[in-house]
Image (cartoon, grey):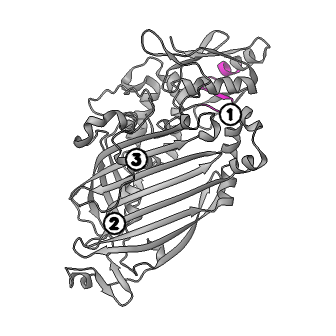
Amino acid sequence: MTSLHWKRFVWFCLCLTLSHPAWTAGGIDIPGYAPATGVERSYRVQKATETDMSFWFDKPGASAMTVRGAFRQRMMVLSRDEEGMRVRWSLSADLPEDIAGLADSYQMNLLYRNSLTAYGTAALELETDLNGNPRDLSDVDQIVAHMREVAANGPGGLPAAGASAARESGLYDIIAKLEANPLQIVAALVPEAQLLATGQSYQAETMKIGQASATSRDEDYGGVSVPVTSTWTLKSTDATARTATLSLSEAADASAFSQSQQPAIANLISGFAERAKNLTADQLASVKRASKSRSVELVVSLNDGSTLEASEIVTVEAGGTTLRTYTHILREDMPASLPLPAVLTAKDLQTPDLHIEPLPSAKAGPGILDELSIPPAPPKTSQTVAPDNDGPKAIAPVSLEVKSAKVVSAPTSFGSELDIMLTPESAAKFQDFTQAAVGEITQVLINAKVVIEPRILTPITGGHIVISEPDSKLLQDMAEQLTFPEGKILVRLRP
């Protein structure tokens, strides 16, 4: 909002008319964000993610998946001065009491509980700017130390397969990313802070109902600069509730965004190589296009400029797939005024079985990382999946042939990686296996020896297997074994 160049106004002008918004010749004055300190606010947060990969599947409905969550988070402004604010968020993965009976359809809560366990915290203390945008995080060293302990010993201090599981899950990579940019912790655990700040400005502003104001900025996507256009509009005011409703519409430049997504799209196409061969020229061109848009509605207080309610929909289309995320936030001491998408309130919602098991914790309360919590695509029908006598999945092991295997430097300071590229036929088999085995603990064997035991959290496309290991000599030995004609990889469910 600060980039809209709205006019300043004098605070006491608002106080002169307590029964209606502050009207001026130029429009409606919206006060600068001035939250009370020492007052805890409770927010009801509802989220959902819809994924559609039906373009790539014979049965269109088989790949449509919805995952949702409902939370109650609390925030308190601890202090505020002319430089910024100190804010504490108290976090919980528990379902609000009024929807506890529908727990099975709120799988995000289970994933989020594991996130809190992995990070080892249920509260974050942030330094923000005067709009409420996070800019620093306290206790980063403590969080990173906890994650290093998890990487070394396993969740809850259980040593069994801890370091091996950490390497296969990419936990070391994530730790390095968090050290480089601690605000990723905020984005993973309390993205609500950023969304609320979207509607807040430390400066008083003046807007006219119905008048649109557009701005632009550049965002970086994998080294590609993508122009993003934002359009703000004051939709309405409520004199009784003393609120203003704003809308924000954002769109990424289609050409630049498509360019930024080409590596990911190429990997997706290679994962569906056989199907891609049958695409027409128009279909292939469509697959290579990408777009991203964002639609936000915000209800802002005309008393202190704070965001009382926010509804956001983000849509990304790329590589023949569509991902749409929904977020709704309501401060619980205020009545709701924005309509909720049906996906957030549906009583009967078909959700995938993600087989989410709680991470063991040394504490009684909640801690898997958000990066490890991205919902997977559902299994393809080509992979044989059936319940056995004991209930778990029966998924046949797959033997894989290697195209190349080389040791490379890891993108962190934790050693080297063995980068294995499968043959096209084996890549397709491996993709089918991982799609069917989502949520299961598996074993990767090289010449009959178990080298890692990963839990499959998302289907793996592209035919790459990466094994991280501080001992580069051990990795080199594996690479040499795989260069021989008889060198094979077997992937199976852990017995």
In the displayed structure, 180 sits above or below 299; it is: above
User: In the image, residue 97 lies at what x, y percent?
Assistant: 22, 41
Label 1, residues with CA under 10 Å away: few <14, some 14-19, many ≥20:
many
Q: Is residue 461 magenta?
A: yes
Residue ID for mark 3: 343
Residue ID for mark 2: 299
In the displayed structure, 309 sits above or below 182; it is: below
Mark 1 and mark 3: Cα distance apart in space? 30 Å
Q: Earlier in the sequence, mark 1 or mark 2?
A: 1
Q: Is disc 1 in contact with disc 3, using a CB cutoff of under 8 Å?
A: no
Q: Earlier in the sequence, mark 3 or mark 2?
A: 2
Look at the numbered disc 1 and give the secondary structure of its residue: helix
Label 2, residues with CA under 10 Å away: few <14, some 14-19, many ≥20:
many
Q: Is disc 1 in contact with disc 2, using a CB cutoff of under 8 Å?
A: no
Q: Which one is in front in this view, the residue at disc 3 or the one at disc 2?
A: 3
Mark 1 and mark 2: Cα distance apart in space? 43 Å
Give the residue at x 43% y 33%: 368
Left or right: where 188 falls relative to 463 = left
Give the residue at x 21% y 85%: 16
Q: Three-letter amino acid code at disc 1?
A: Gly
Q: Three-letter amino acid code at disc 3?
A: Val
Look at the numbered disc 2 and give the secondary structure of its residue: strand
Residue ID for mark 1: 271
Give the residue at x 37% y 62%: 132
Q: Earlier in the sequence, mark 1 or mark 3?
A: 1
Look at the numbered disc 3 and give the secondary structure of its residue: helix
User: In the image, residue 247 lies at what x, y percent?
Assistant: 43, 68
Q: Three-letter amino acid code at disc 2?
A: Val
Q: Quadrant of the N terminus?
A: bottom left
Q: Is residue 405 magenta?
A: no
Give the residue at x 34% y 55%: 329
Q: Which one is in front in this view, the residue at disc 1 or the one at disc 3?
A: 3
